[in-house]
């Protein structure tokens, strides 16, 4: 006769195995560098990403978090003590808050904090370079070395040229809003430290245009990032590929092995609660001797114009960042006037 203990033993053994199995997030950390796509201090502290990122959208959300209350009040007091054009002062306070949030986050992550140059400068190389230099100087004044910072720039041609200048000065760049192969390769040729191809926004465009994929391996965002990753490795490019803008954990899992993946806290939590197996999907191939013509502005513009998805998504991405910055500036202007 089988005892109760013997009957329950397999169940207990299975529970023990599950409790010892690593989560998919833990497995992913062994395959890719995990970056937190948030300015949420507590979420970053809890989820322990290597890097984190911020932009006007995320800073705007961060301002409602209690952990930043002291920073906000200090910078508002600074703003109220300034004389001159009220909007210029509000803009300066926003910059100071952006660097203040980034400085606090830099204390939490072992890697880098990514800080965005505003979308209003996206088509102006010199203005982008000037703002990037200003941000780096502000970080260094706050005790954060440039080696801890990535400057995020929209990947227009002007942005590519700005990255070329900044990288030569030792200021590492993240060229973002990547939707097109030529756009990605131009960033690599400019020496950008990192690019951010947007998986979810590519899928959104195809779904909106009646082209819903039948499987994750046919997801156009996943296919695009896999292709960029493979081509960069084939060319021996040192530019880091960081998949971004995920709509599901399935998209993330389909890119396991990509250099870096920037993931929202809600999807990080889902991966941390899933104890299934997470196999590597991307494997870097051997570099080859590749003889290709360098991409110039004419080639860049022609290939972007021929790609309606990339053209639309780059433009709307820049507009969204610029809009969120304006909302943030107006909120600060209202606070200063109160």
Image (cartoon, rainbow, N blue to C red):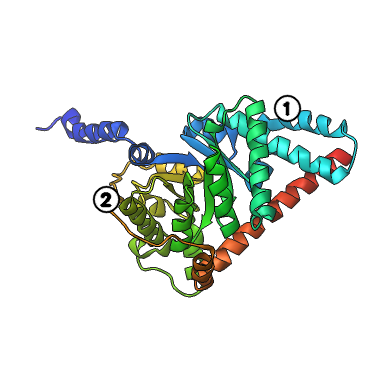
State the residue in front, 323 or 211.
323
159 relative to 299 in the view: left or right: right
Quadrant holding the C terminus:
top right
Q: Quadrant of residue 30?
A: top left
Work out whether 254 lies above or below 148.
Answer: below
Give whichever of discs 1 and 2 has the lower sequence position: 1
Observer-nearest of 24 and 225: 225
Q: Secondary structure at mark 1?
A: helix
- Residue name at image x 57 percent, y 67 percent: 312
Q: Secondary structure at mark 2?
A: loop
x and y, in percent, of residue 121 in the image? 68, 53
Any mark on residue 70, and which? 1
- Coordinates of residue 62 in the picture (x, y in percent): 65, 39
Residue 118, visible in the rendered structure: no
Q: Is residue 258 left or right of residue 97?
A: left
Q: Is residue 117 left or right of residue 220?
A: right
* Residue 323 percent coordinates (x, y): 70, 55
Residue count near mark 1 (Cα–Cα under 10 Å), binned few <14, some 14–19, many ≥20: few
All told, the count of numbered labels is 2
Residue 315 visible in rendering: yes
- Quarter of the image for residue 104 reads top right
Quarter placement of the N terminus: top left
User: Distance of mark 1 from mark 2, alpha carbons?
Assistant: 49 Å
- Residue at image coords 43%, 40%: 34
Relative image position of residue 249 (x, y in whole percent):
41, 51
Residue at the far left in the pictured view: 1
Taking the image as shown, residue 168 lies to the left or right of residue 134, namely left
Name the residue that disc number 2 marks.
285
Q: Is residue 6 above or below residue 246?
A: above
Residue lying at 39% horizontally and 68% vertically, measured from the top left:
213
């Amino acid at each position: 006769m089988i005892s109760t203990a013997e009957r329950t033993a397999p169940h207990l053994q299975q529970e023990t195995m599950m409790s010892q199995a690593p989560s998919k997030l833990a497995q992913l950390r062994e395959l890719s560098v995990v970056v937190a796509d948030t300015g949420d201090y507590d979420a970053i502290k809890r989820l322990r990403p290597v890097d984190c990122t911020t932009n006007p959208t995320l800073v705007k959300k961060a301002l409602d978090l209690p952990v930043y209350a002291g920073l906000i009040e200090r910078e508002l007091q600074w703003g109220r003590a300034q004389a001159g054009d009220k909007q210029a002062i509000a803009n300066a306070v926003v910059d100071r808050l952006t660097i203040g949030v980034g400085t606090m986050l830099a204390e939490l992550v072992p890697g880098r904090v990514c800080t965005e140059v505003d979308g209003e400068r996206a088509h102006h190389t010199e203005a982008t370079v000037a703002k990037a230099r200003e941000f780096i100087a502000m970080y260094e004044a706050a005790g954060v070395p440039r080696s801890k910072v990535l400057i995020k720039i929209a990947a227009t041609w002007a942005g590519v040229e700005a990255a070329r200048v900044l990288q030569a000065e030792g200021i590492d760049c993240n060229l973002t809003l990547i939707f097109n192969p030529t756009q990605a390769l131009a960033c690599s040729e400019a020496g950008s430290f990192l690019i951010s191809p947007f998986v979810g926004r590519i899928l959104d465009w195809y779904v909106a245009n009646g082209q819903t994929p039948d499987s994750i391996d046919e997801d156009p965002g996943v296919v695009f990032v896999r292709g960029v990753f493979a081509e960069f490795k084939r060319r021996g490019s040192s530019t880091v590929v960081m998949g971004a803008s995920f709509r599901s954990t399935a998209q993330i899992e389909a890119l396991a092995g990509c250099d870096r993946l920037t993931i929202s806290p809600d999807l990080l939590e889902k991966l941390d609660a899933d104890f299934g197996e997470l196999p590597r999907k991307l494997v870097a191939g051997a570099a080859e001797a590749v003889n290709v013509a360098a991409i110039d502005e004419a080639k860049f513009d022609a290939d972007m114009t021929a790609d309606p998805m990339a053209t639309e998504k780059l433009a709307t991405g820049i507009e969204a960042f610029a809009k969120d910055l304006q909302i943030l500036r107006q909120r600060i202007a209202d606070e200063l006037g109160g």
